[in-house]
Amino acid sequence: MKKTLMKGNEAVAEAAIRAGCKCYFGYPITPQNEVGAYMSAKLHQHGGVFLQAESEIAAINMVYGCAATGTRCMTSSSSPGISLKTEGISYMAGADLPAVILSVQRGGPGLGTIQPSQADYFQTTRALGHGDLHLPVFAPYSVQEMVDVTTKAFDIAEEYRTPVIILADGLLGQMMEPVSFDDEEVIEKPEKTFDWVADGHMGKRKKNIITSLQIESEELEQTITAREKRFEKLKANHTQSESVNCDDADIVIAAYGSASRVVQSAMEMAREEGLKVGTFRPVTISPFPVNAIVKACKNAKKVLVVEMSLGQMVDDVKMALEHKIPVEFYGRQGGFVPGPQEILDVVRRLK
Amino acid sequence: MRVNEYLIAGFGGQGVLFAGKLLANIGLVSDKQVTWMPSYGPAMRGGVCNCSVCISDLLIGSPVVHLPDTLICMNSPSFDKYVPAVKKGGAAFIDSSIIDQKFDGKDITCHYVPATKLAVDNGFSTNFGIIVMLGKVIKESGICDTETVRKALETFVSAKKASLIDTNIKAIELGLNA
């Protein structure tokens, strides 16, 4: 299909509509307002509902209720808003409900800045709400990949009965790039039904109860281990990453999302200087592509992790490599996107 | 071709984002990789606005332009901030009907064009000044012909505003002859 220029935020919304998302609940916050704006203009044309809630907490609980009926639904927000949604996300994970949640990071802590940041890696991969839970997180690096992972996220959410997170940032949300979709038009999909839903059955079947409350320890432990088994299966089937020029690389630079774009340019500049540099980019940051990074770094003398934060993914890299290779870190904070020259300078110092 | 980095800067309302969109769509219809990145932050909220556009044959890394190859400069604050940032061998297009400063650096080519005045003198509204300037950029860089500009406009100007395509083309032509 022909390519058009779209903002990352709009592209996610369009991809969601095409994936059969029927309900969007959200509350405005920069830099992700285009998602809600796009949904408010388009979703109703496809038999869906856009609703601006009175708060982020209200919005995530509307998603909770909507997901309980088996309807494809989503919400989106940015850092402070995602913090507010974490309680609801934990309840949804506890109730095994599928939904897609887009997190467009901005600089923090607190209200911070509306500029792009990657400071919510820990929040997203470790602590999207309390409790024993692992949630799948996609971290796209281009507008096209935002489309691709959104399409996938809805399917995975239903297959594994889990909220799925897409972690972007202000840069990916606001920038325009050429994107294409599989089909020329939106193709309406038949709505699926599931045996676990609470959608009003008029006494025709046994009742379903959607709840995260499991007061008996035996029961809760069973549920958690069954859920973790599903996550293990997800790990085997959907862990995704990309490595470039790693086979002969002395230095592998690992980065995700926006930072990985800059890293890619820096790698090309380094190669032009004859420096053997490769790049590793996780597409899923949870589950983290442990095997893939070990393979990518097998000939590396040093690994450099670049993030737009004080350093968060760097911990996952160190754990994955079991401290067998020295891991260095370079980061910018406060909403700054590093330039490729800046990263090249760091690489030269490592040599 | 390496990445060609453009920075367009001015006040909100001058059409900075629109001009950037047009430039990005010129790249798109020419089958190039493109990125378009607006300033959506504190700068925008203070009234000053800029927009980064990258056009390349290869994958584009950062869409944020720090050191432009080509700068379109539509007000004094962006003259002070961005003209010194233009890459060696690059070009700055400066609206001399708005900015009276001159740049004394030697490594870049400065084109002083009274774009906004040209637009108004020829019956356009002030926000076509930047389109006139884009015409001048196209003339000096030779990135495309008028037909490509028309194709680019058609990809993103909605059918309801189709009459604006001809108006924009006329403003581009004014810049091509400036």
Image (spheres, coloured by chain):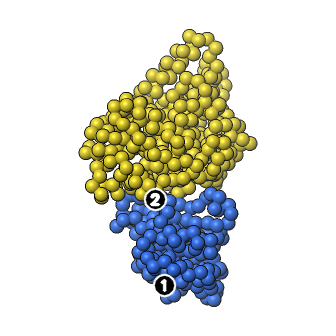
Chain colours: A yellow, B blue
Residue A145 at what x, y percent from top left? Answer: 45, 48
Give the position of the N terminus of chain A as an image quadrant: bottom left
Classed neighbour count for the residue bearing mark 1: other residues with Cα under 10 Å, few (<14), some (14–19), many (≥20): some
B100 up-or-down from A160: above or below: below
A85 up-or-down from A264: above or below: above
Q: Residue at image x 52%, y 57%?
A: A175
Local secondary structure at mark 2: strand
Front position in the image: A44 or A82: A82
Task: Give the alpha-carbon distance from disc 2 to disc 1, as whole Å.
Answer: 27 Å
Disc 2 marks a residue whose amino acid type is Pro
Residue B118 at what x, y percent from top left? Answer: 59, 86
Q: Nearer the viewer, mark 2 or mark 1?
A: 1
- Label placed on residue B176: 1
Disc 1 marks a residue whose amino acid type is Leu
Q: Which residue is mark 2?
A: A178
Local secondary structure at mark 1: helix
Q: Could you tell me which chain the residue with mark 2 belongs to?
A: A
Q: Say which quarter of the image contains residue B30.
A: bottom left
A6 up-or-down from A247: above or below: below
Front position in the image: A176 or B102: B102
Q: Residue at image x 53%, y 79%?
A: B103
Q: Could you tell me which chain the residue with mark 1 belongs to?
A: B
Classed neighbour count for the residue bearing mark 2: other residues with Cα under 10 Å, few (<14), some (14–19), many (≥20): many
